[in-house]
Amino acid sequence: MVTPAIGKSFFPFPSSSSSSSSALRSLLSITRLTTTTFRPSTACCAIRPVSTPIIHRMPLVTINQSIRESLKKHGVIPDVVDDFTPTTMISIAYPNTNKEVSLGNTLKPEDAQEKPTIQITPEGTDESQTYTIVLTDPDAPSRDSPEWSEFCHWIVTDVKLPSLEALSSAQTAEAASVNLSDASELVEYMGPGPPEKTKKHRYVFLLYRNESSKKLEGPSKRKKWGNDDYRKGARQWSDKYGLSLVGANFFFAQNSKQ
């Protein structure tokens, strides 16, 4: 079991006063400021080098259970995926706008139009393991009327973790991100575009562990992932290729005209 020292880029929880967010912030309490040097034996990401608050080290299983509770609170479980306990953490950042995805924070659509950077903190250290990352909207065209759901925003596969050697020399969180240029993009990234007067949409990143050498193909259409039934897109597609869901993260976005 890996017990990571987690930098700011891993799940900085929103400043909401909700009981769930408060509980998560209490559990993952920020205990000190540091310029800690990255150590592969205790972490899978580099700490940002300038006075960055870090989360007190704690068992990864405890963190992942808290992530699961957040997914359930906001309906990602069961609207998008069946109930599961994450074993791998996925961190998403939009460096061009200096925004991060943090388990239900709210971003402006314009903040997430460029392809993000991704960091993955796995339970193990198998450098040969590959992953698939998905971004899907279960609230298209709205959460109240999801007849277009899900809408596929992104699929990238054959994602590999940086080597331990690369991680050990990384001086910034961005330098420790996965190299998406070496991966295969099955569906080109499309940023959020919620229609007017449709309230907040959930934009859900799903992380799958590739379990076989079967070649993956993207869905025929973005809308409903090419399916007849709604809200079965990512779940049905991943089952088809035998992918194992190991992590998730999400944010909210809405059109400025409500």
Image: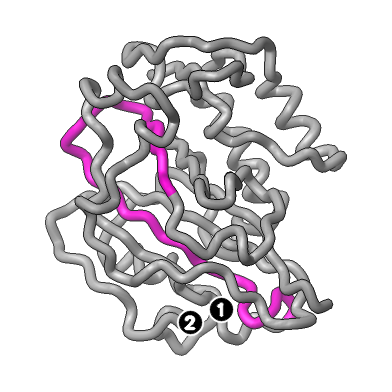
Asked whether 245 or 178 is in front, the reply is: 178
Mark 1 vs 2, N-terminal side: 1
Q: Residues within 10 Å of mark 2 (few under 14, many from 20)?
A: many
**The image quarter in which residue 148 lies:** bottom right
Kind of residue at badge 1 = Ser
Is residue 59 inside the magenta stretch? no
Q: Residue at x 28, y 64 (%)?
A: 185
Q: Residues within 10 Å of mark 1 (few under 14, many from 20)?
A: many
Is residue 126 inside the magenta stretch? yes
Query: Residue 165 placed where, x, y %?
Result: 21, 21
Query: Residue 250 placed where, x, y %?
Result: 58, 53
Residue at the bottom extreme?
A: 228
Q: Is residue 116 left or right of residue 204?
A: left
Q: Residue 149 bears which disc, if any?
A: 1
Secondary structure at numbered mark 2: helix
Query: Residue 203 placed where, x, y %?
Result: 58, 62
Disc 1 + disc 2, Cβ < 8 Å: yes
Residue 97, placed above or below residue 12: below
Quadrant the N terminus occupies = top left
Q: Residue 224 bears which disc, if any?
A: 2
* Magenta residues, start to end: 117-144
Q: Is residue 37 left or right of residue 106?
A: left
